[in-house]
Image (cartoon, rainbow, N blue to C red):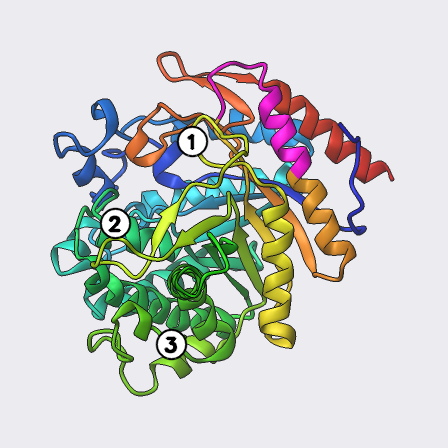
Amino acid sequence: MPDRFDLPAGFRWGAATAAYQIEGAVEEDGRGRSVWDTFCARPGAVRDGHTGAVACDHYHRYPEDIALMKDLGLDGYRFSIAWPRVLPTGAGAVNPAGLAFYDRLVDALLEAGIAPLPTLFHWDLPQALEDDGGWLNRDTAYRFAEYASVMADRLGDRIPTWITLNEPFVHTVFGYAMGIHAPGRALMFEALPAAHHQLLGHGLAASLLRERGLEVMLSNNLTPVEPASDSAGDVAAAEAYDALHNRLFTDPVLLGRYPDLSALGVPDDIYGAVRPGDTDLIHAPGLDGLGVNYYNPTRVAAPTDPGLPFDLVDIPDVPRTAFGWPVVPDGLRRLLAGLRESYGKALPPITITENGCSTPDAPDDQARITYLATHLDALAAAVTAGVDVRGYYTWSLLDNFEWAEGYHQRFGLVYVDFATQKRTPKASYAWYRDLIAAHRAY
């Protein structure tokens, strides 16, 4: 494996996590209930009945985890703030103990020389807001903006850059359209008001963050979409899927308008969710950076099911992760080149805010090293071709609670024995540490 890649001076190296996946302590210090607490209690919702109640116990063990980050030599750490830990019912009275935890975490990161990069929403909506409709309720966007203000007022003196949302595509489709993630609704395309309200929340929060002199990012799971053949049906299906997965969440923020969703059978007002002035609110604050979470491309064919305008089909003859996801490193280069081509001067600097893979649960994870190295090589090729990429945060620092898969998928640079909470750095941890050191010395 190469000991360095052709990336610019000042390129930021990091790792990422999310609150519900690592913190645990779900009933401690005044934290409110989240949709994931409720979903995990639903029989059959999560594999083997696993929950995030303890997870990696990061709430108590964060000093040990920051020591691992410091040893890695990370420039930055992307984490998420648990909305119900700060505002137990999603609005109203603030929980001082919740704010104090993030004070301790941020101060410890800064003392270790690691820049905090917080995400305000990584899917753990307070259950009280879900009881009132969740992201299907327009009011949730305004409660999100209030929450963003609380966090900016508390931590904005130490954190210059904030991510509003993580993967609104996944949260909308898995949580509201298909029901395989919390909150477990199965509304199909009628879930799309939840997408609009998340974006509206982003716009409202971004304005308030900007008023405080802070920089704003949004991270989404993006995928290069390829038709299964050159046939008109396959090409049209790929365009429809690209509009849903990628452009629905990027066009409004960067261009101030939604893409044409007619191929999906979705009205322009997204079932009445879009009101006059909304796209201006979403677009007006702009973005200081776009977070890109990349795992794999998507291959699409003309539909066989009349209920959908596309079929998702396998990508043949490629390796697969332990999760079964196709490994296509050049997809990252194609994705980044496509963003530059599509958005031109409207495209802000990019940060890879997630990229990684699940491998079998052994500390000698050579497959992960190969995965990371080949994707970084593809990233370097995109940078050489002119795409402005400022940093790379691998997913994930720790093995953790992997949503509906429970503890069966391991993405971490660090192996976690969930029975004892013992942390064991994997081979990929040492490789990443050496890679960062080589770039810093160059």
10 Å crowding of disc 3: few (<14), some (14-19), many (20+): some
- For the residues labelled 3 and 2, the Cα–Cα distance comes to 23 Å
Residue 157 % position (x, y)? 55, 59
Residue located at (50% from left, 55% from top): 226
> Which span of residues is magenta-colored?
359-374
Q: Residue furthest front?
A: 231
- For the residues labelled 1 and 2, the Cα–Cα distance comes to 21 Å
Pointer 1: what residue? 324
Pointer 2: what residue? 175
In this rendering, does residue 333 appear at all?
Answer: yes
Magenta run includes residue 165: no
Residue located at (38% from left, 80% from top): 279
In this rendering, does residue 74 appear at all?
Answer: no
Which comes sooner in the sequence, label 3 or label 2? Answer: 2
| Mark number displayed over residue 155 | none
The count of marks equals 3
- In front: label 3 or label 2: 3
Instruction: Tell me the amino acid under the disc marked 1.
Output: Gly
Q: Residue furthest bottom?
A: 276
Pointer 3: what residue? 260
Residue 353 % position (x, y)? 55, 48
Picture layout, residue 143 above or below residue 169: below
Q: Is residue 276 left or right of residue 18?
A: left
- Helix, strand or loop under label 1: loop
Q: In this orientation, which residue lies closer to the viewer: 380 or 426?
A: 380
